[in-house]
Amino acid sequence: MTEPGARPTHDESHGGALGSRLNWLRAAVLGANDGVVSTAGLVVGVAGATDDRSTLLTAGLAGLLAGSMSMAAGEYVSVSTQRDSEKAAIAMEKRELTEQPDAELEELTDLLEERGLSREVAREAAEQLTERDALRAHARVELGIDPDDLTNPWHAAWASFLAFTVGALLPLLAIVLPPSAWRLPVTVCSVLVALAFTGYVSARMGSAAVRPAVWRNVGGGALAMAVTYAAGSLLGAAGV
């Protein structure tokens, strides 16, 4: 209960910060999912051709390192491009504020009015925001960018690298640790359970239906393992 005269407090996260955290968490879940599927397909395919533990370990480690590095490099390039675009948009907005401040004030007023404010209130709010920090106001309202919190390519790269590695470790350990007769069933079962979990989590984070997401995830992983195992078995039988 709030005491008289005290300002009310709350612990709820702001929408932007919460959305950013959810995006990172969703990317981590999907990265781990990619690690599970790609590495499982690789080691199961090799298991179709040979049951040699060292060969399976070598193939699995190679797939883990190649996949995690590829994911990290891809995220770094992608997020760097996004960051460059954000910086360019902010620079353009800064130039426009210097060259045509009146037009920019009118534009900010229109944007605030579109969000439900009356024309008078929108104008007053635009003037106050401009007086306080015109560039930050336009960046947030017009561009949807927080100048103090631009996307970080290194964070994205490391997050993707770690997520993929964690996901890839499951099928790798499942294929090399059990006895020879149990390797394939243990790997398939553990991978399907992991895919069901990541499908469930990704669906809940996206407020989507859980059952279709889980079945898609599990079905895709099962199909990948079946195809690679069949290919490995054929190559092994042919003596390749």
Image (tube, helix red, strand yellow):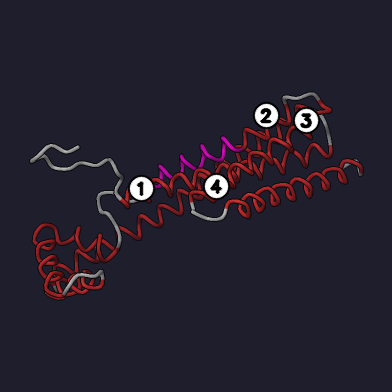
In the image, what residue type sits under mark 1? Leu
Measured as percent of width and height from the top left, residue 197 is found at 60, 41
Q: Is residue 203 left or right of residue 187?
A: left
Asked if the residues shown at circle 2 and circle 3 are in contact, with their CB atoms under 8 angstroms apart, the answer is no
The quarter holding residue 174 reads top right
Dot 2: element: helix
User: Residue 3, located in which quarter of the rendered image?
Assistant: top left
Residue with the mark numbered 3: 183
Q: Look at label 3 and name its amino acid.
A: Arg
Query: Mark 1 sits on what residue?
Result: 18
Q: Which portion, as a residue range, is magenta?
A: 152-167
Crowding at dot 2, Cα within 10 Å, few <14 / some 14-19 / many 20+, comes out as some
Residue indicated by mark 4:
30
- From the top left corner, tell me how far across and down residue 97 is, in percent: 16, 67
Q: Are marks 4 and 1 in contact (CB under 8 Å)?
A: no
Mark closest to the chain's N terminus, 3 or 1? 1
Q: Is residue 161 left or right of residue 144?
A: right
Query: CA–CA distance between discs 3 and 1?
Result: 41 Å
* Secondary structure, magenta segment, majority class: helix
Q: In which quarter of the image is residue 145?
A: bottom left
| Residue sitting at x 24%, y 42% | 10
